[in-house]
Amino acid sequence: IYCPTFLDKDELLRVRRSISNNVGMYKTSVLRFKLDAFTYLNVYAKNPWKLRTTSYESGGKKDEECSTLISSWEKCTCATSDSCKRCYKPKEDSDVKDVYPITGLKFAEATAVQSEKVTLLREPENKYDSNAVKVVNGSGKLIGHITKERA
């Protein structure tokens, strides 16, 4: 499973929940995330350098709803602190995202699926509107533009 950034913990949890919901993975299964660098360097769990390759994990018998992202390198302070660095739980409204109407779909090079992350890019050289904002998918392909009223 590829996630563009490990800094967006809400995205990692969203990916984890969608895998268990849409792929039929057992709710009690633990999913572990590791950095691409380890894969490219052929560094796996049992390596001669004893490097910890897992960055985060989620799920398992104690977290069947995949509501917590556990950091592999932090010490748990849940018993002594309200904000444990190891056990990340999103805010209640973290799944609420802004919705922007997209125009120009007939000129699109690609599409996006529901909940897919897209990138908004200013397009000052646009001949129709110098305030235009184009929407591209993860591959950089044009999906459309944000409507003039929202740009």
Image (cartoon, rainbow, N blue to C red):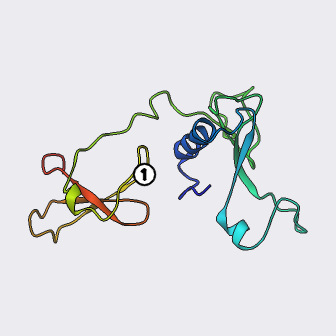
Kindly indicate the quadrant of the structure image that contains residue 90: top right
Kindly indicate the quadrant of the structure image that contains residue 38: bottom right
Q: Relative to 118, does residue 100 appear above or below in the rendering?
A: above
Residue for point 15% across, 68% down? 126
Q: Residue furthest right?
A: 48
Horizontally, residue 79 falls left or right of residue 151, namely right
Residue 100: percent from left, percent from top: 26, 44
Residue 133: percent from left, percent from top: 22, 58
Report which residue position mark 1 lands on: 117
Horizontally, residue 31 falls left or right of residue 91, namely right
Q: Nearer the viewer, residue 35 or 2?
A: 2
Q: Quadrant of the N terminus?
A: bottom right
Q: Relative to 143, does residue 113 appear above or below in the rendering?
A: above
SS for callout 1? loop
Q: Residue furthest left?
A: 128
Kindly indicate the quadrant of the structure image that contains residue 97: top left
Horizontally, residue 10 falls left or right of residue 52, namely left
Residue 141: percent from left, percent from top: 35, 66
Residue 128: percent from left, percent from top: 8, 65
Residue for point 64% across, 33% down? 66
Horizontally, residue 45 falls left or right of residue 100, namely right
Residue for point 77% across, 29% down? 61
Residue kind at label 1, given as amino acid type: Lys
**Mark 1: few, some, or many residues within 10 Å (few <14, many ≥20)?**
few
